[in-house]
Amino acid sequence: MTEHILKKITLLSILFLLIVNIPAYADMGRIVAYGAKVQENSQKAIIFYNLNEEVLILGTDLQSGSSSHILRFIPFPSKPRVQLAPKDSFKNIIKVVKKHNLQFIIQYKGVTPTTKSVEIKLNKKIGAHDLTVIKINSTEHLREWINDFFKSKGLPVKNSYPEVEMVVNSYLNKGINYFAFDLVKVNKKQRFVQPIEYRFHSKKLYYPLITSNTFGGSGIIDLILISPRTVCNPLESLYEGCLGVKYLRATTSDSITIDEFNRILPDAKNFFKNKSIFIQMLSYGGSYKFKNDIFVDITNKYKKAIGYTSNNDSSVYHSFPWEDAVGNKPPVKKPAIYLYPKTKLNINILLNIDGKITKTVPPYSHIWKITAYPSGNISGGYDYLMYEAQLNSLTLPKSGWVVEYQNLKKWFDTYLFKIGLNKKEKLQFEEYWLKELPKAKYYEIKLLSGDFLNKHMNIEIKPKPDTFLRFIFYFKPLSKKIILSEQKIVTPKRVGFTAVEWGGILDKRKNKRCFLYYDRGPCEALFWRYYYNKQENICKPFIWGGCGGSVPFKTKEECSKACISKLLVKGGN
């Protein structure tokens, strides 16, 4: 028997045993006992993960030189429950991907990164599966089970399966000893194998890769992930890979609702409960020389959707890189909530913040229950309620104002009345912010949009006010004047029970180069330059070609001084 390695492969860590009566081939962790040439033309996976449990739906395109049986098996970190995936799972998820316009970021030498839409193709489905889940305690146990299985199907057996035994043994050494076996039949026509759903418990996002190393080759991996996290920044993945896998690229991500995929995961509501969830696609293309599987705790990944806007785009900034050089988010400082009911009123207030509440006055435990009076006084002797928070993301309008530092008081006197604050609210705003804004030549000032506040800083007041005025400012000190189109203001009217909120964000990140991504450019010279790696909090070298491209820092010392020390963020007390 002769074994060959297929030159062209397309996906992942599933082992195959092919049983027919002509020369054998090995493909991507697949062992061929007897066989015709079988191509795993495409394999795709849908992954639902809620941080404790994973649902993995696998679909594969297969083709053989003649009618063939393939025994695939997959390692799992815990015992999986196995069943056929709902009908048309991949057709339905492709519609969802298109709806959310997920984009890969691509870059050519000397050209600003741009985007490319996701494209997924499916072939026709083929027959039934013969599925078994076993717990393997040793390679001898595996060999015995495989031969017993082959005999029960009238198929030839072998004394050993060295390649597969080596791979399985590596998993056993890591404590992974559950394996799902799947027998399918393929023929000369390329077909899409009917998808299988595997459900298992895991504290880490899991996807097996190492099995494909056994036979080498190269291929493509496509993973569609739906979880409470965006696992990778698409622009960072362009340069650094994703989830510890080099060349694993991530698309942009987007928020998604349960109704959009409950035909694929019927118990989606119970599976994700009340979590905010996101959709993102990961894709790998390259050699199968993986050092490890995807087995990553994603708890601390992004709790937001991440899009992409090129530096040349003057439209609204999307998914603002809302962190300093070491991952700290400048807080929203002292949002103050004033209440003016027409009569004495008992009020409940809920803060639904996309981020972390860091401070409240009075103390907040899931709800504020207070009594408010027409004068604006609040039970407990307060003029207003106050909270502070760190947001997971920030979207800024392109328009705003640029004000000289020495003219801030004059600007506040004019514009705070224009936006709708009364005399008391204006004076308390100025008393706080004129002390908190450090001296600078100019300030960039913007008002966050109502849509952003409703989505990311939602406040529920019961009973609902007749008028709710919300003003959260963005302040950024500038060393030189920039040009902004002025933000339009329509002075609102106060009607009936009125609530008012003001607050602000002070952005003091001093060096945007800490957030730049390197590009060696179109030239072929060799110069060492440096960029800041936020995940590792270190400055790393790269080779610059000598022209064009992007060079964040010329020296390591310059990079370290600018990025590694924490950036100061001032706020209210």
Image (cartoon, helix red, strand yellow):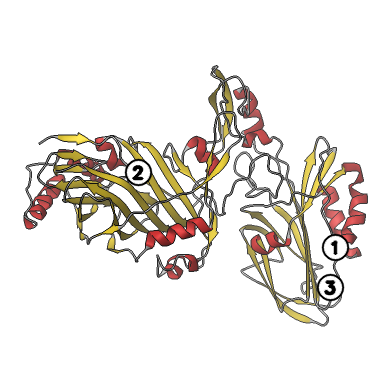
Which dot, 1 or 3, sits closer to the camera?
1
Q: CA distance from mark 1 to mark 3?
A: 24 Å
Element carrying mark 1: loop
Sequence-earlier tag: 1 or 2: 2
Most distant residue in the front direction: 189
Q: Residue at x 56, y 53 (%)?
A: 305
Quick one: 88 or 157, which is closer to the camera?
88
Residue 375 appears in which quarter of the rendering?
bottom right
Q: Is residue 177 visible?
A: no
Query: Left or right: 142 with respect to 190?
Result: left
Q: CA distance from mark 3 to mark 2?
A: 59 Å
Residue 490 numbered mark, or none:
1
Decide: is 490 above or below 380.
above
Quick one: 127 or 147, which is closer to the camera?
127
Q: In this figure, which residue is indicated by the disc labeled 2?
A: 293
Q: Residue at x 20, y 51 (%)?
A: 187
Q: In this figure, which residue is indicated by the disc labeled 3?
A: 376
Quick one: 96 or 167, which is closer to the camera?
96
Q: Position of residue 261 (x, y in %)?
A: 45, 65
Element carrying mark 2: loop
Q: Residue at x 33, y 34 (%)?
A: 289
Which dot, 3 or 2, sits closer to the camera?
2
Which dot, 1 or 2, sits closer to the camera?
1
Disc 3 residue type (three-letter) = Gly
Decide: is 175 above or below 491.
above
Q: Position of residue 541 (x, y in %)?
A: 54, 25
Disc 1 residue type (three-letter) = Val
Disc 2 residue type (three-letter) = Asp
Element carrying mark 3: loop
